[in-house]
Amino acid sequence: MINKISRKDTKTQRKMKDSGIKWLGKIPEEWKLERLRFHIKLNPSKSELRNYKENTIASFIPMEAVGKYGGINREETKTIDEAVGGYTYFKNNDVVVAKITPCFENGKGAIADNLSNGIGFGTTEFHVLRPEPHMDSCFLFYLTISYPFRKLGEAEMKGAAGQKRVPEDFIRDLRHTIPSYEEQKFIASFLDRETEKIDALIAKKERQIELLQEKRFALISHAVTKGLNPNAKMKDSGIEWIGKIPEHWEVKPLKYLGKIVLGKMLTSKEVEGYYLKPYLRAQNILWEQVDISDLREMWFSTYEMENFRVKNFDLLISEGGEVGRTAIWNDEINECYIQNSVHKVTIKPNCNPFYFLFQSERSGKFGYYEAIVNRVSIGHLTREKLKEIKFVMPTQQEQDSIVDHITHESKKIDTLISKIQESIEKLREYRTALISAAVTGKIDVRQEAA
């Protein structure tokens, strides 16, 4: 089990002194408090490459190849000649730190190691911190992913919203605790071991969530295609991705089950007599839920407002993006409309919209929508395609029973998932606290790391 921060042999027993910095508080008496500029070389010059041949292979690390709180994907490479002009340079044991929002706040950064020929290039949105000989690269890495470093850096970001960056001066001028080189090694070793344990526990719990989600999907898949009566006589549905269904169930294209409307083409210009209204895009449609945290507005005529307004229990199906994502509108806000990356389907009175939500989810997660879309570079689920998609249709009473069953059983699964997610969040908080405590001297790990 993970060693607790509060263990007696991990608590600091050494003499402490006041750092004079409010956020830092007391620090070990023998530790230095100095600006990072004295312990690193920031964004080293590409002139160091002058002794390399232009066709030398180097690792290429785009932003997406760097994990949150460590880890690098080194699959890509470029020659020095290809990369030297437009990318950031680094070499083995340098620490790369994402400088742009939201990557910086999210903890993106890593130690550059095992690079091709010992050198690498990456996005210009990296700061490169090269430790001086008296600074351990692993300790420096943990310092840069610690909570104080990230929060202080966030407060110093410059630039317009969405393009804010951490300036070089923040890193150079940051006053931080610097232990001896030997103790830096102890701290890095301790954190390597303890964070590995925490990450293993998190991975185990994330796998538990995956299994529960698979169980929930299996529950939905079986209920909407086989029903709840295990003794029902079956027949071939004639639909490859569904197989056999109860003998008395029908198979109908969606066009016979409800009214399908594709949303309005995006327009940004104000038009006299039109009204500025919020609308849903494909990005707002998630599986089983509508995300209204980022709604945009455009102009609608009176006729368009009548045609494109979403009403309670309308099915919403994404036309673009991850095509086929389906949710039900539940009057999340008083008035909302759809743009032409979203279909709304008003299901007929003898149909339960939630049953068709679950059946659509099954089709989507089985890859059926992706298989039928018109695809050049981005897939589109056109109205013509959507209206011909076949759904299996039990009696209304059975639809209601199936929805009740799925809802009841899903609540049990969702409760378990929520509890596991809470425990994962606590582990992540503990990991963050442990790193911050270790690099600022709030815990003495010398015996732990020995």
Image (cartoon, helix red, strand yellow):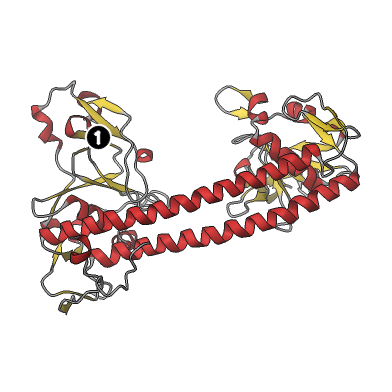
Q: Nearer the viewer, residue 299 or 107?
A: 107
Tell me the kind of residue under disc 1.
Answer: Phe
Count of residue discs = 1
- Residue at image point 12% right, 56% down: 39
Horizontal side of residue 397 vs 268, given as left or right = right
- Residue at image point 28% right, 46% down: 110
Q: Secondary structure at mark 1?
A: strand
Asked if one can make out residue 149 in the rendered structure from this viewpoint, the answer is: yes
Spot occupied by residue 246 in the image (x, y as percentages of width and height): 86, 34
Q: Nearer the viewer, residue 163 or 172?
A: 172
Residue lying at the far front in this picture: please name it. 231
Quadrant where the C terminus lies? bottom left
Spot occupied by residue 150 in the image (x, y as percentages of width and height): 32, 59
Q: Residues within 10 Å of mark 1 (few under 14, many from 20)?
A: many
Q: Quadrant of residue 436?
A: bottom left
Quadrant where the N terminus lies? bottom left
Horizontal side of residue 315 vs 6, given as left or right = right
Q: Nearer the viewer, residue 19 or 221?
A: 221
Q: Please give the residue where the numbered disc 1 appears in the rendered image.
A: 121
- Against 241, is 128 above or below? below
Q: Quadrant of residue 419?
A: bottom right
Spot occupied by residue 159 in the image (x, y as percentages of width and height): 35, 52
Q: Quadrant of residue 251?
A: top right
Asked if one can make out residue 330 in the rendered structure from this viewpoint, the answer is: no
Spot occupied by residue 5 in the image (x, y as percentages of width and height): 32, 69
- Against 336, is 55 above or below? above
